[in-house]
Structure formats: structure tokens, C-alpha cells
Image (cartoon, helix red, strand yellow):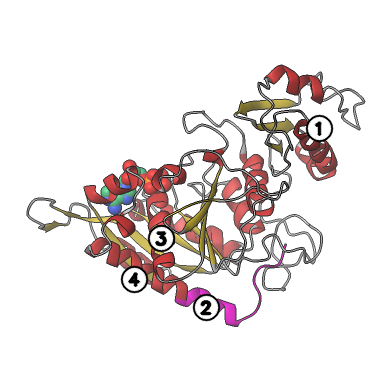
């Protein structure tokens, strides 16, 4: 990503041109070109934005970074290419989750419990003061809805806010923020984040269609995420909210290890508290030394849109009890209300569309607690140092 042609208007670039160009690149170990070796997969071309993966054996991954860069540069040099995103992908993650490279630096400066070695102290996003993850044990619990409303609530409080849609399997933030189109580049080297309602945003959804099934595997998630941080002109931000992919598998664990997170919040519904999914999420972050700011119970209770009556349709209150048991904070509850769905579906989440509603107030209260935790953490020392 973020490698740009000076002539993006030169039209019609197809898969064939890209594959032809890639035939000039050889796998250094196997001596044949990467196309003939069947290493190029998931090629997508959309309005001058090119995305594909190079499949490699997991253990060769780190050594093939120069190959990835060459592929990216080669594709970018083609007329009509605005951006090229190339990632290395493998069947298995390159290292067992949690395996620490000795002495790898950590966001706070201490040795990090995991993650790949990188150039020491190179800031990934020098202007971003804090990164927080919004995570969930499984999909469909309202993680993205929560992330977007919290980002807007933080912005409404006067903070400089960005949101990074790392849920590359189902990127929904562009739709929720009402941002159509594709990112461009003003400096010719980095992608400009998209922006609406005062929040900057980058998402794989801008580069691939929402309907396109993304079949790329775990390691690609990490590469894509890294590029969305490193190769985007985020500028100065107080906080970057990362909407994580759902679940607590290897991809999520790798991501929590490698992104310099100031903290994480876990969204769950009353039902999945019972299923212990949230607990898994919490343990995942603890395992990699990321402070968990607390749990948010979404779809906590039902408010009748006609009479305003509140009903506890699920066994409401589970998150509060679970938070106590797990010795983490309970950050708040958000009701199940059709207005929350409709407003985010229409690109104007409830914090923007109905700022005086009790639901917007609930998001703002949670955002305040998160901000307090970020500030408390910031006093302990700098967080944004590459791992
Ligand atoms: P996830 O990111 O966990 O997959 P989403 O945020 O995409 O979940 O939410 C899934 C669906 O549930 C969306 O249609 C969303 O509008 C809806 N939704 C989320 N939270 C609420 C809520 N509190 N009340 C009503 N609908 C909600």
C-alpha cells in the first residue's frame, strides 16, 4: 500500500498486466518466478487499487519481506496503479503464538512477550498518542457498532480520533461512518485516511468490495493491518481505535502482540458472557501484556421503541458480574435498540445522529472511562514504540 503512480488516470489495468509484470520477480530460493510457482493469490484490481497475497512457507515469511516489497514496487510502477497492497501469507502463522523473540522491545519499553523483531524504535505512527483495541470473543455482538460510536464519542469530547478497521474479514466501518469512495494520496507516498463526522478512518473496505469474500488467511490480517498503520498519513491523533477481527484465534493473538496497544475493551452480549467468549478475549490480551480496560455489555436490555419500557430479554447483568469475577472493570451497558442499528446502517451512528439520546450518553460515558484509562497509562511512559 501507499506506493503511488504519478499517473493514476491512465486507464484499464487488468489482472493480466499485473501477472505479466510479476513474472519478472523470482523466488530467491527456488529460482523461478512467483507467478509460475503459483505463489500469487487473491489478486484484486479495483479502480487502480491492487491487492494480492504471495503465498510462502510460514518459516520463510520474515526472510521474504524484500520479495514482498519488490512485488509492491513492480505493480505500483504500472500505469494506472494508484496503490498496491501486497502481503505475505502462509498456511500457518510464522511462530507459535506467544513465542517471544528474546529482548524484543515493547510499547512501554520493556521486553515484549511476543511479536516479530523489527527495526528498533522505529515509530509506526509517530503522531498517534494511543492505540486501543475494541475486541469480541465472536462475531455479531456489535463490536464494530460499539467501536464506531466510541470513536465518535471520543471525538465529540474534543480528542483527535482515528478508527482503523482491522476486521478485514467483514469491514463495516466505511458503511457505518457513511464514507464511500477510495482513498487517495496527497504526498504520493502515503494513503490519506478517509474522514467523516470528524473522525479519520482507514479500512480494508476502501480497497476491496464489502461483498468480496476475503479468503486470505491469518498472517495476511497482520500484514494488512501493519500497512494500514505504517502507510497511512494519520497525522496527529490522540487516540486510534482499532476495530479488531472477531474471535480469539491466532490472528487476533498475533495482532494483539504486535500492535502497540495502550489497552483493549471487550464487547459482549449477555449470551456470550455465558458462553465464556468474552473471558477468552480477556485472557488473550492478558497473555500478551495488554491492559484490558474492561467489558462492555452490548444488547444488554431491550427498550420498546413505542412505549420506552425496558425489558431484560436476556439474563442482563452478566457482564458486570463477570467483570468482577475476572477482576476487570465493567465499563457500561448498551441496550438493544433498533435506533442503534438504523443509525449506524445509515452512516450516521447514534452518537452523531441523536447526541441527546440516553444511548449516545451511554457511549460517551464509556468513552470517558476509556480516556481516563488512556491518560493513566500515558503517565506510566511512552507507548508508541515499535515492537
Ligand atoms: P460485530 O462487529 O460484532 O460483528 P456489528 O457491530 O456489525 O457486530 O453488529 C451486528 C449487527 O447488530 C448490526 O446490524 C448492528 O447494527 C446491530 N447492532 C449492534 N449493536 C446493537 C444494539 N445495541 N442495538 C441494536 N442493534 C445493534
Does 144 lie within the magenta span?
no
User: Percent from the top left, x then y, of residue 178?
Assistant: 40, 45
The mark that comes first in sequence, 4 or 1, is 1
Task: Kindly check if marks 1 and 2 are in contact, taking CB atoms under 8 A apart as contact.
Answer: no
Residue 365: % across, % down: 34, 71
Instruction: Give the alpha-carbon distance from disc 2 to disc 3, as whole Å.
Output: 18 Å
Task: Judge whether residue 140 can be spotted in this image.
Answer: no
The residue carrying mark 1 is 74
The secondary structure type at the circle numbered 2 is helix
Task: Give neighbour class at mark 2: few <14, some 14-19, many 20+ (Cα, 10 Å).
Answer: few
Q: At x 79% / y 57%, what residue is drawn?
A: 118
Residue 152 numbered tag: 3
| 373 falls in the magenta region | yes
Q: Secondary structure at mark 3?
A: helix
Q: Nearer the viewer, mark 1 or mark 2?
A: 1
Query: Which segment is the magenta one?
Result: 372-387
The residue to which callout 4 is attached is 365
Which numbered mark, 4 or 3, is in the foreground of this view? 3
Label 1: element kind: helix
Amino acid at each position: 500500500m501507499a506506493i503511488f503512480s504519478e499517473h493514476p488516470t491512465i486507464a484499464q489495468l487488468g489482472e493480466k498486466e499485473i501477472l505479466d509484470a510479476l513474472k519478472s520477480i523470482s523466488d530467491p530460493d527456488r529460482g523461478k518466478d512467483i507467478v509460475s510457482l503459483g505463489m500469487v493469490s487473491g489478486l484484486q484490481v479495483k479502480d487502480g487499487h491492487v491487492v494480492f497475497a504471495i503465498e510462502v512457507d510460514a518459516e520463510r515469511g520474515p526472510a521474504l519481506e524484500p520479495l514482498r516489497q519488490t512485488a509492491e514496487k513492480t505493480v505500483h510502477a504500472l500505469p494506472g496503479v494508484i496503490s498496491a497492497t501486497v502481503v505475505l501469507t502462509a498456511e500457518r502463522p510464522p511462530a507459535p503464538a506467544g513465542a517471544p523473540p528474546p529482548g524484543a522491545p515493547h510499547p512501554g519499553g520493556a521486553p515484549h512477550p511476543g511479536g516479530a523483531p523489527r527495526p528498533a524504535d522505529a515509530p509506526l505512527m509517530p503522531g498517534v498518542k494511543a492505540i486501543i483495541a475494541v475486541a469480541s470473543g465472536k462475531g455479531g455482538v456489535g463490536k464494530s457498532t460499539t467501536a464506531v460510536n466510541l470513536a465518535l464519542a471520543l471525538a465529540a469530547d474534543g480528542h483527535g480520533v482515528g478508527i482503523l478497521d482491522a476486521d478485514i474479514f467483514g469491514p463495516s466501518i466505511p458503511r457505518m461512518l457513511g464514507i464511500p469512495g477510495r482513498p487517495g494520496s496527497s504526498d504520493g507516498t502515503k494513503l490519506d485516511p478517509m474522514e467523516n463526522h470528524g473522525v479519520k478512518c482507514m479500512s480494508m473496505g476502501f480497497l476491496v468490495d464489502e461483498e468480496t469474500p476475503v479468503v486470505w488467511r491469518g498472517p495476511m490480517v497482520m500484514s494488512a493491518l501493519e500497512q494500514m498503520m505504517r502507510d497511512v498519513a494519520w497525522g496527529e491523533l490522540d487516540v486510534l481505535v482499532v476495530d479488531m477481527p472477531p474471535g480469539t484465534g491466532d490472528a487476533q493473538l498475533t495482532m494483539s502482540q504486535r500492535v502497540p496497544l495502550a489497552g483493549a475493551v471487550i464487547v459482549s452480549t449477555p449470551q456470550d458472557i455465558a458462553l465464556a467468549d468474552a473471558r477468552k478475549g480477556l485472557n488473550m490480551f492478558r497473555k500478551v501484556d495488554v491492559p484490558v480496560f474492561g467489558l462492555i455489555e452490548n444488547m444488554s436490555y431491550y427498550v420498546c421503541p413505542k412505549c420506552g419500557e425496558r425489558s431484560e430479554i436476556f439474563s442482563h447483568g452478566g457482564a458486570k458480574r463477570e467483570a468482577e469475577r475476572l477482576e476487570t472493570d465493567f465499563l457500561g451497558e448498551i441496550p438493544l435498540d433498533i435506533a442503534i442499528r438504523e443509525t449506524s446502517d445509515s452512516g450516521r451512528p447514534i452518537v452523531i445522529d441523536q447526541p441527546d439520546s440516553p444511548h449516545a450518553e451511554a457511549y460517551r460515558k464509556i468513552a470517558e472511562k476509556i480516556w481516563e484509562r488512556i491518560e493513566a497509562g500515558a503517565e506510566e511512559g511512552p507507548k508508541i514504540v515499535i515492537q
